[in-house]
């Protein structure tokens, strides 16, 4: 490693990589969505700014060879100035089946959160749901266990920083990776949430096991049904039949105006009905969008 005029060691240039993972962002900050920015904000608060800057350069140059995410662990290989790539790992706590059973129940109890997740969206309020269960969604300042096989004495090194920035961009493309890192895969979570409104078949993840990022197994009725109501004879309800049954405080804020107009259609199980061989939902979606457009005029 050559010595510069000021007596400090000059960093050797990394070996150029063909086919590495390159950051989509070419300049400025990395991370566009609120969940990836939340992750980056944590990093930039606790990590050395200079090393993060060099890590961004590595990420944009494509020095990261591969990136693998599983429950509680991200593994990667980063090509530096030496012939052999460095091994990088980033660990957080992956929640078990019992913890995820409580989280799914809490998410299912919030109809709007449930609907947005089923529509592929990540509502900002999901952090509050996790916090309410005593389980953080994002790692705190001491919640990341990071390691790199390079000889760099600084922490995190530029190799780790490059992986962290690419991880944030991966979160941008698929917010459910944040949840998979915590131990719950996308499809199993969505199946559990769908089951809360579909007759209670397999909605509870309690008693299951975490394997490969997914929660498997389990049975029971721990998650309330979205449309469950008490069966009360009409004669006993004649005085309040047309009332909502819930106080205005419990109804919560109105739906997010940025939500898609067919959000309800996406959230509920589709009826097995066709008209002229066309699924009913395909006929209803244009009508919902037309009504939303007319309302906004």
Image (tube, grey):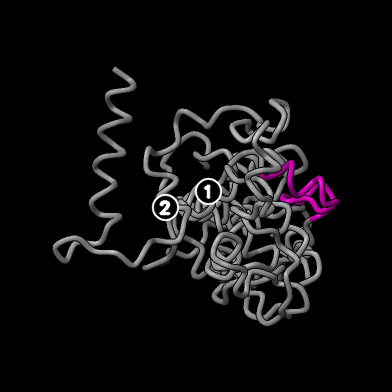
Q: Which residue is mark 2?
A: 266
The answer to whether residue 17 is above or below residue 57 is: below
Q: Is residue 79 visible?
A: no
Which residue extends farthest top? 297
Tell me the quarter of the picture where residue 53 sits.
top right
Q: Is residue 61 visible?
A: yes
- 58 or 195, nearer to the observer: 195
Tell me the quarter of the picture where residue 101 sits.
bottom right
Quadrant in which the N terminus is drawn: bottom right
Disc 2 on helix, strand or loop?
Answer: helix
| Residue 196, image x, y percentages | 61, 61
Q: Callout 2 environment at 10 Å: few (<14), some (14 to 19), or many (20+)?
A: some
Asked whether the residues under the numbered discs 1 and 2 touch, taking CB atoms below 8 Å apart as contact, a structural biologist would say yes
| Residue 184, image x, y percentages | 65, 67
Quadrant in which the C terminus is drawn: top left
Q: Residue at x 48, y 65 (%)?
A: 15
The answer to whether residue 198 is above or below residue 283 is: below
State which region is magenta. Answer: 126-143
Q: Residue at x 57, y 66 (%)?
A: 195
| Residue 198, image x, y percentages | 54, 65
Q: Which residue is mark 1?
A: 115
Q: Residue at x 30, y 55 (%)?
A: 281
| Residue 41, image x, y percentages | 67, 38
**Magenta: predominant secondary structure element?**
loop
Q: Callout 1 environment at 10 Å: few (<14), some (14 to 19), or many (20+)?
A: many
- 274 or 245, nearer to the observer: 245
Disc 1 on helix, strand or loop?
Answer: helix
For the residues marked 1 and 2, what is the alpha-carbon distance in whole angstroms? 7 Å
Which residue extends farthest left? 276
């Amino acid at each position: 490693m050559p010595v510069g005029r000021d007596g400090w060691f000059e960093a050797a240039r990394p070996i150029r990589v063909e086919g590495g993972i390159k950051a989509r962002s070419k300049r400025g900050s990395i991370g566009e969505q609120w969940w990836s920015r939340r992750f980056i904000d944590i990093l930039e608060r606790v990590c050395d700014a200079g090393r993060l800057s060099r890590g961004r350069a590595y990420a944009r140059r494509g020095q990261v060879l591969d990136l693998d995410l599983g429950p509680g662990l991200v593994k990667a290989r980063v090509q530096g100035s030496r012939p052999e790539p460095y091994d990088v790992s980033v660990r957080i706590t992956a929640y078990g089946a019992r913890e995820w059973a409580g989280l799914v129940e809490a998410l299912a109890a919030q109809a709007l959160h449930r609907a947005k997740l089923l529509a592929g969206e990540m509502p900002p309020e999901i952090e509050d749901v996790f916090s309410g269960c005593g389980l953080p969604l994002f790692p705190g300042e001491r919640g990341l266990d990071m390691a790199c096989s390079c000889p760099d004495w600084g922490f995190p090194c530029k190799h780790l920083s490059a992986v962290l920035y690419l991880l944030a961009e991966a979160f941008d493309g698929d917010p459910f990776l944040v949840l998979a890192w915590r131990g719950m895969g996308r499809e199993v979570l969505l199946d559990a949430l769908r089951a809360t409104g579909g007759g209670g078949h397999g909605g509870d993840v309690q008693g299951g096991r975490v394997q490969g990022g997914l929660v498997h197994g389990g049975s029971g009725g721990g998650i309330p049904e979205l449309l469950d109501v008490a069966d009360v004879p009409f004669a006993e309800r004649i005085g309040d039949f047309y009332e909502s049954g819930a106080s205005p405080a419990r109804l919560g804020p109105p739906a997010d105006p940025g939500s898609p107009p067919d959000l309800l259609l996406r959230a509920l199980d589709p009826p097995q009905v066709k008209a002229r061989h066309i699924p009913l939902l395909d006929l209803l979606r244009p009508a919902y969008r037309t009504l939303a457009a007319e309302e906004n005029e």
